[in-house]
Amino acid sequence: MRRKVAELAGVSEATVSRVLSGADNVKEETARRVIEAANKLGYVPNALAQRFALRKSGNLGVILPMLPKVNLFSTYYFSEVLSGIGMTAKQRGYDLLLLFREPHEPRDYASLFRTQKIDGCIILGAQDIPSERAALQELRDGEYPFCLVNQRFEGEAFCTVDADQRMGSYHAGKHLVKQGYRRIGFLNGPAEYSNSLDRLKGYQQALKEAGLPYNPEHVLVGNYSRKSGYGLAEAVAKLVESGEVDAVIAANDRMAIGLMQGLKELGIRIGEHLALVGCDDSDVSRMTEPPLTSIRVPFYEVGCEAASRLLDAMTENEPPAPFEIKLPVKLIERASSQVSLATRD
């Protein structure tokens, strides 16, 4: 059979053997002819050998941050996005290769392509810091296919898929204003994440349209963890007790829930003394007391969209043209933002 493959491909039997054994000293075009001839004759070599021959790994890489003391797979954001990526990749015949990045280790994403570990990659948890920008620029300059999820970089043309974070906090602010609140605080995440900046802009836009002043002292910063929300409870309590704040928008549900727990210990009850809105609409937002009003973010769909667009480009064997996709969000009203008028007076 190998002789027939060699004749059809126009190469020697030795070349066929090298290609089907996964040797790397064969030109890509020659390897492609051999694989096509083998398939046409019904001689299907080992799948791994095919991938080596065609300089393909069959892996879609997903780069994740390694966060101390955080189980990423138990967090709503990461589990939903990864489910969307994984389902789409499976449907397209790709395996996922999860790659964890330590907070301070060098970013060298291009080496993953050079060593043929991955054919394309999706990056979660990217930060707007010099080392990250340099690594992404290297990917772009090398024409390696990659896509960012939930992060964009001002002044850079990368492929990004995200939810409309700005509209989420804008809708939250509009909702609170409609309920009668006029002293709205904001609990944000770190500025190196673009979604933190987008959510802050949405909050500011809602205040401006309502004719309410923006006070930077009413903006507190956590790190998107429940612990950070809990740790800021004392600062929020002081703002509530002084009458400076009667409602708070938190940039994710984990911080909102931590804040809710901390305030409860200080004698401030959500739904009685303070209105609270979270972001994500995670499963636990329905289980708090009172249930948490939250911005529903389609993280699963974000993962599907990122994987689908990237795999489309990989199938065409061309680097994807830069794109920026934003999926719509929706405010889900629950009891946490329904403080009575009597309580507010």
Image (cartoon, helix red, strand yellow):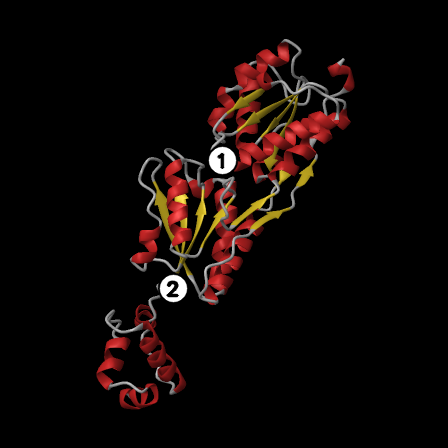
The label on residue 193 is: 1
Q: Nearer the viewer, mark 1 or mark 2?
A: 1
Q: Relative to residue 44, is residue 195 depicted above or below? A: above
Image coords of residue 219 (percent x, y): 57, 21
Residue 200 occupies quadrant: top right
Q: Nearer the viewer, residue 305 or 153?
A: 153
Residue type for callout 1: Tyr
Residue nearest the observer in this picture, 250 or 202 = 202
From the top left corner, tell me how far across and down residue 147 is, in percent: 47, 51
Q: Is residue 343 above or below residue 297?
A: above
The residue sitting at 47% across, 66% down in the picture is: 315
**Residue 320 relative to residue 34: left or right:** right
Measure the alpha-carbon separation of dots 1 and 2. 31 Å
* Residue hosting label 2: 58
Q: Residue at image x 37%, y 49%?
A: 138
Residue type at mark 2? Gly
